[in-house]
Image (tube, coloured by chain):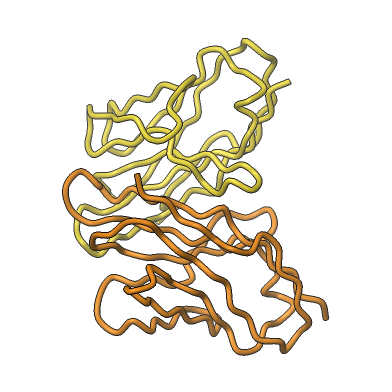
Amino acid sequence: NAGVTQTPKFRVLKTGQSMTLLCAQDMNHEYMYWYRQDPGMGLRLIHYSVGEGTTAKGEVPDGYNVSRLKKQNFLLGLESAAPSQTSVYFCASNKVDRVYGYTFGSGTRLTVV
Amino acid sequence: AQSVSQHNHHVILSEAASLELGCNYSYGGTVNLFWYVQYPGQHLQLLLKYFSGDPLVKGIKGFEAEFIKSKFSFNLRKPSVQWSDTAEYFCAVSRLGGTSYGKLTFGQGTILTVHP
């Protein structure tokens, strides 16, 4: 049981380049989330999804797009990367019940130069 | 919008000292509360969580936390820290009902350094 898998683990981009981060979960969770972690700011929610084909904005959505075409996958896209998007990105998934079973991925460290 | 505040940015202790990390949140409704730990270079791991019932929650590695509803607080404690507890600790809150969808709001994090 792999849980939540994020790819890639590390990436360096030049300003203006685009890329897609992949999050895959094998626990049949309905909810999936993308967070970014920055020093002194904790984790902040970028986008989330409550089911296949649905997405919604979180706290800091600007500059990012997401898609949930399959239940197990949640993609985070950067169309034109900026240095301000240098961060560690975490994906998480969760069950649809009151006893939340949050599971985090191992993170993607992205540097935009 | 709800917010979570962790009062200490960096705490430095010697081994065997007692630990208490403060966490306050702003949401007035029913919440679920969490403490996560992040060891250097690793992802977040759940230390403990509170959903309902006994406000004193025990977690892994000897950690515990107390939910005080009247103070909107969920402080993390450990009687005797070890060098291996060196990590960053995050408090998180999820409100229940409506369109919450299990979204977590995190505090800023507290870096704990334990000297041998």
Q: Which residue is drawn at the image coordinates 65% and 35% (left, top)?
A: A10
Q: How many marks?
A: 0
> Residue B93 in the image: x percent, y percent?
38, 58
Point out the image quarter for the C terminus of chain B. bottom right
Point out the image quarter for the N terminus of chain B. top left
Residue at the extreme left of the image, as rendered: B98
Locate residue A61 relative to residue A84 in the image: left or right. Answer: left
Front position in the image: B39 or A37: A37
Q: Which residue is drawn at the image coordinates 47% and 66% (left, top)?
A: B35
Front position in the image: B113 or B42: B113
> Residue A16 in the image: x percent, y percent?
62, 10
> Residue B4 in the image: x percent, y percent?
45, 55
Q: Which residue is drawn at the image coordinates 75% and 78% (left, top)?
A: B13
> Residue B21 in the image: x percent, y percent?
57, 72
Chain B on-screen colour: orange
Which of the 4 quarters of the picture holds residue A18? top right
Residue at the extreme front of the image, as rendered: B70
Locate residue B111 relative to residue B29 in the image: left or right. Answer: right
Q: Which residue is drawn at the image coordinates 72% and 89% (left, top)?
A: B16
Locate residue A33 relative to residue A20 in the image: left or right. Answer: left
Front position in the image: A48 or A23: A48
Front position in the image: B100 or A64: B100
Chain A on-screen colour: yellow
